[in-house]
Image (spheres, rainbow, N blue to C red):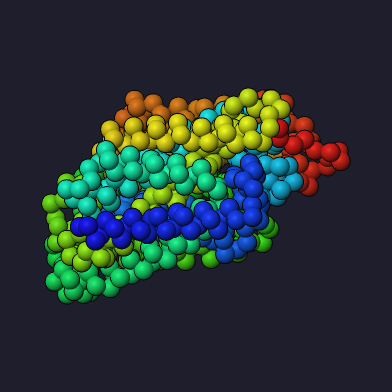
Amino acid sequence: MTVALAIALFIVAATTGGTTYLARRRRRVTMSEWAVGGRSFGSILLWFLSAGEIYTTFAFLGAAGWAYAYGAPGFYILANAPLGYVLGYWLLPKVWRAGRDHNVMSQADYIRARFGRRWLAGLIALIGVLALIPYVQVQLTGLATILTVMFHGSIGKPLAVLVGVLLLLTFTFTAGLRSSAFASMVKDVFVVAVVVAVFVTIGTLTGLGGIGGIFRHMAEQHPHYANLPGMQSGTHYSPWWFCSSILMTNIGYWMWPHSFQANLSAKSDRAIRRNAVLQPIYTLSYFFIFVIGFAALLTLPHLTDSNTALVSVIYRYFPQWFIGIAAGTGILVALVPSTVMLLTLGTTVARNIYRPTADLSDRHRLLVGRLATVLGVVVAAYLTLGSSSTIVSLLLVAYSGIAQIGPAIILSLLWRRVTAYGVAAGSIVGIALVGIPQVSTWWSGVSSIALGLFAVAVNTLVLVVVSLCTRAPEQANIAVGIPDTQVPRTAPAPA
């Protein structure tokens, strides 16, 4: 176990130190550099940054866990990136141009520029921050799972969470988004190598007879694993749930403040479109992860926590040196995307919640942003220590909330008549529907359609009705989202 721990620590330390050095070399850490990488990322760097923030412990552990526990319901994950980038191919270049032309560095910056209302930017910023904290919780949950399973007897959950917090804060405070992009390159090389190595050898090492043998044993022992509702009959995982969950998560795909903000780092809209075409290729890795989850189910059928399926099978059947590599990879999988989320949280608080109208120095706001990340990590760590939910379940709940920003962002790029009061009313109604426990309980007894999608529909209806009854924004503000609008020469920029 000492060998495995040493290898894991070396991978994490070398990646953190090396990427931070490369990112900071000859660059002064300003708010723009810290938050959006100086708007200078080309196709390759943007591709790795996107992969780093999208393919998190949700993919590494959550997909294998749901294959282990449910089977077919987890297959909705396969549609996430391909359908998400269909929307992204149209949406993201428009967002990027607004960022370039109006000094937008965060999602709330865009809302303020588009609608000319600081209070609305503050409301959307608050929703985004509240949604990001459980997303960081997902990563800390995955990190704790990796460390407690792979170093069984040496590291408990509280210590694992503490280590994760210290690593996150160290990495986030150093050089910002550029370090995360460089670290994503290292992380993705390790992820592909580990997943492929386990996929190729797992059938032989477990005695299941290769990949074909795994599917044969699954068909014999769990004949319903590939059909909804999966291996747990009587659940609400119906075709209606499956389709509505795909739609709901894809509406929320680019509404995450960190996903929105990361694309502002691109140096051109062409780089964004190229990334939208190529990024879904990464989805192929999910097939490997599902197979590993099935192998875990066949050989370790009595795990009390499905989140541990992938790491448990590695711990059981692979040598110490490989366990160390896999553990180091898993830590990076949790660390890198969490850093992007925390950068976004800090930027949002510093620019849109903390004294947004004050004329503060860049250094002052950078300090506020870093303090906000500390508070965000502490809250996420507290929630992690008290939660026992699966990673996928946690993320689906978070997606239900963040998707409520979707109607506002999408319609702001399509419809000139959408208003600040319409956005506020729709967002509040949508958040209320997914956030009130009694509504969730009632809806689960009425329909298997994802509550988040139902809330988006009600949200959109309220947004349209209220917008038609209230005054439209100024033409200069409309032009932020719809540039072909006739406007005066000088358009407003966010403070």
Q: Residue at x 41, y 49 (%)?
A: 335
Name which quarter of the figure residue 286 lies in: bottom left
In this rendered view, identify the residue nearer to me: 216 or 391: 391
- Rendered view: 259 above or below 190: above
Taking the image as drawn, is residue 418 in sight? no
**What is the x, y in percent for residue 427?**
54, 31
Numbered label tally: 0
**What is the x, y in percent for residue 120?**
62, 28
Taking the image as drawn, is residue 23 in sight? yes
**What is the x, y in percent for residue 359?**
71, 27
In this rendered view, identify the residue nearer to me: 209 or 103: 103
Q: Residue at x 16, y 68 (%)?
A: 206
377 relative position to 261: left or right: left
Query: Quarter holding the C terminus?
Result: top right
343 relative position to 446: left or right: right
- Rendered view: 425 above or below 273: above
Q: Residue at x 46, y 38 (%)?
A: 132
**What is the x, y in percent for residue 431?**
47, 30
Name which quarter of the figure residue 26 lies in: bottom right
In this rendered view, identify the residue nearer to me: 417 or 199: 199
Q: Residue at x 20, y 66 (%)?
A: 319
320 relative position to 425: left or right: left
Residue situated furthest right in the rendering: 489
- Rendered view: 22 above or below 352: below
Query: Quarter holding the N terminus?
Result: bottom left
